[in-house]
Image (cartoon, rainbow, N blue to C red):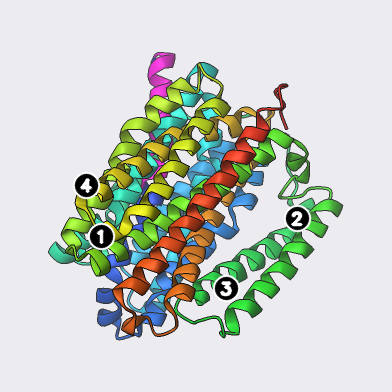
């Protein structure tokens, strides 16, 4: 087999991992009412099917990124496929809601192993001149997973059953394991002793992210007077402080804080957090605007939302390839300018409820994302020194997962505060004010991301961590 075909199969393995994880982050959403009915449980209990996956896949990214560097990217990556596939099987045959929630947690752990090392495998084993375009393909695959997740879940649940939402992963997982075993290179690693492993840091990170996710999920529709979200935020902050203190003192930290001494890397991560938070907030709130305020039916809304993802799918490989030739900072700056203009445009025109104005905004959102994500990812991974690809990849994906939680929660909070506690009785004018304020906040986040990215241009010398 030629090197070229081997590289292609490595990229296919990484793409399958990204597709499976992103699909399963969204594919179960539409199935939850059916699952709730089948098991005779409340919506709150059924929501734990989502939360278990989110907690497992977010809180362990740093852990599995570090283990990828220590034990070998291939070992952790393939273990992730095994866990994800096994978790999918257990989800599909779960006899009750408790087993389903626990199985979903296992699936999330496997997903975390895959995502934590996905970009690292591409950066480590693909030719350097192909890294940008390869990361662009991963970005496209991610968009495909996000776009198809909810519609595919609805179709499978309607025509088959919710069980097949999970069981469909098994043949894909088996094929991915076979490809990864055959084509991802093994690495020679020094023997790693778990006696010096940072179990305390891992536990602190798990609790910190768990309470952070609980806090922001609790803000939804609870109003400003709710006590639980603020309490969970305080507990999360305490665990994060203890985690940072621990990582400074331990000999084998799961997060190398020296990463953040690299100013360009830190700025690229912050820009990614800000831009992705805006995107996730838009993805959450836009369907409400289109259905409740504009009056489109669910199938029309699904088709409209697909516009953004289709543009990202088309543009991400192109921007990734350009990032191999043009400095990624220039491409990110261009993308963020598009994003700022687009969000300001939407905030000023949303009351007109014109189909073409909505299409222009959704197209612009795809143009911004497709131009930003691949160059930003390449900029981050280019700064990873030998033996650090796993932890840098995991850190980048941890920032992305935090962006999902923060973006949805901030957009929801701003909208709820504007509309008031009795949202069911809100007028159209109040609803539009809530949407406008949330998307104006998104524009502010993009301005901050633009300033951060522009500031990183002053770092003329390329650094590695």
Kindly identify which numbered label has been placed on residue 64.
none
Q: Is residue 274 left or right of residue 313?
A: right
Nearer the observer, disc 1 or disc 2?
1
- Image location (x, y in percent) of residue 418: 46, 73
The kind of secondary structure element at disc 3 is: helix
Q: CA distance from mark 4 to mark 1?
A: 29 Å
Span colored in magenta: 2-19
Kindly identify which numbered label has been placed on residue 198.
2
Q: CA distance from mark 1 to mark 2?
A: 38 Å
Residue at screen point 55% across, 73% down: 214
The residue to which callout 3 is attached is 215
Residue at screen point 32% across, 52% down: 169
Q: Is residue 306 visible?
A: yes
The kind of secondary structure element at disc 2 is: loop
Q: Is residue 166 left or right of residue 374?
A: left
**Does residue 283 lie above or below 396 as drawn?**
below
Q: CA distance from mark 3 to mark 1?
A: 27 Å
Among the 4 quarters of the image, the one containing residue 402:
bottom right
Among the 4 quarters of the image, the one containing residue 117:
top right
The residue to which callout 1 is attached is 153
Q: Is residue 40 magenta?
A: no
The residue to which callout 4 is attached is 356
Q: Earlier in the sequence, mark 2 or mark 3?
A: 2
């Amino acid at each position: 087999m030629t090197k070229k075909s081997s590289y292609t199969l490595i990229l296919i393995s990484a793409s399958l991992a990204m597709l499976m994880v992103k699909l399963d982050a969204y594919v179960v959403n539409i199935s939850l009412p059916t699952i709730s009915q089948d098991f005779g449980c409340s919506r709150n209990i059924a929501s734990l099917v989502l939360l278990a996956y989110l907690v497992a896949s977010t809180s362990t990214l740093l852990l599995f990124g570090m283990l990828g560097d220590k034990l070998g990217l291939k070992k952790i990556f393939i273990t992730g496929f095994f866990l994800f596939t096994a978790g999918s099987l257990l989800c599909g045959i779960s006899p009750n809601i408790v087993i389903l929630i626990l199985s979903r947690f296992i699936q999330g752990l496997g997903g975390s192993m895959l995502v934590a090392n996905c970009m690292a495998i591409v950066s480590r084993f693909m030719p350097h001149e192909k890294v940008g375009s390869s990361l662009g393909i991963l970005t496209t695959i991610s968009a495909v997973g996000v776009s198809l997740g909810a519609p595919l879940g609805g179709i499978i649940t309607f025509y088959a059953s919710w069980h097949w939402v999970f069981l469909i992963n098994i043949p894909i997982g088996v094929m991915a394991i076979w490809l990864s075993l055959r084509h991802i290179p093994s690495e020679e690693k020094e023997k790693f002793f778990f006696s010096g492993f940072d179990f305390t840091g891992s536990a602190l990170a798990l609790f910190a992210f768990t309470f952070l996710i609980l806090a922001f999920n609790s803000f939804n529709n609870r109003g400003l007077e709710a006590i639980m979200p603020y309490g969970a935020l305080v507990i999360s902050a305490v665990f994060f402080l203890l985690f940072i203190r621990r990582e400074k003192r331990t000999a084998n930290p799961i997060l190398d804080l020296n990463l953040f001494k690299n100013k360009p890397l830190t700025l690229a991560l912050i820009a990614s957090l800000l831009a992705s938070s805006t995107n996730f907030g838009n993805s959450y709130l836009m369907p409400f605007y289109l259905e409740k305020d504009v009056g489109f039916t669910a199938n029309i809304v699904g088709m409209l939302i697909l516009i953004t993802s289709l543009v990202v799918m088309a543009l991400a490989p192109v921007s990734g390839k350009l990032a191999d030739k043009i400095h990624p900072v220039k491409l990110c700056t261009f993308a963020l300018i598009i994003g700022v203009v687009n969000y300001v445009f939407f905030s000023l025109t949303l009351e007109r409820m014109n189909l073409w104005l909505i299409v222009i905004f959704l197209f612009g959102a795809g143009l911004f994302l497709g131009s930003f994500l691949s160059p930003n990812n390449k900029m981050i991974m280019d700064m990873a020194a030998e033996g650090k690809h796993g932890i840098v990849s995991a850190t980048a994906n941890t920032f992305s997962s935090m962006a999902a939680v923060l973006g949805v929660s901030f957009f929801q909070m701003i909208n709820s505060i504007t509309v008031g506690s009795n949202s069911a009785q809100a007028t159209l004018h109040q609803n539009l004010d809530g949407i406008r304020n949330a998307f104006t906040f998104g524009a502010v986040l993009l301005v901050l991301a633009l300033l951060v990215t522009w500031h990183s241009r002053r770092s003329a010398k390329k650094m590695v961590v």
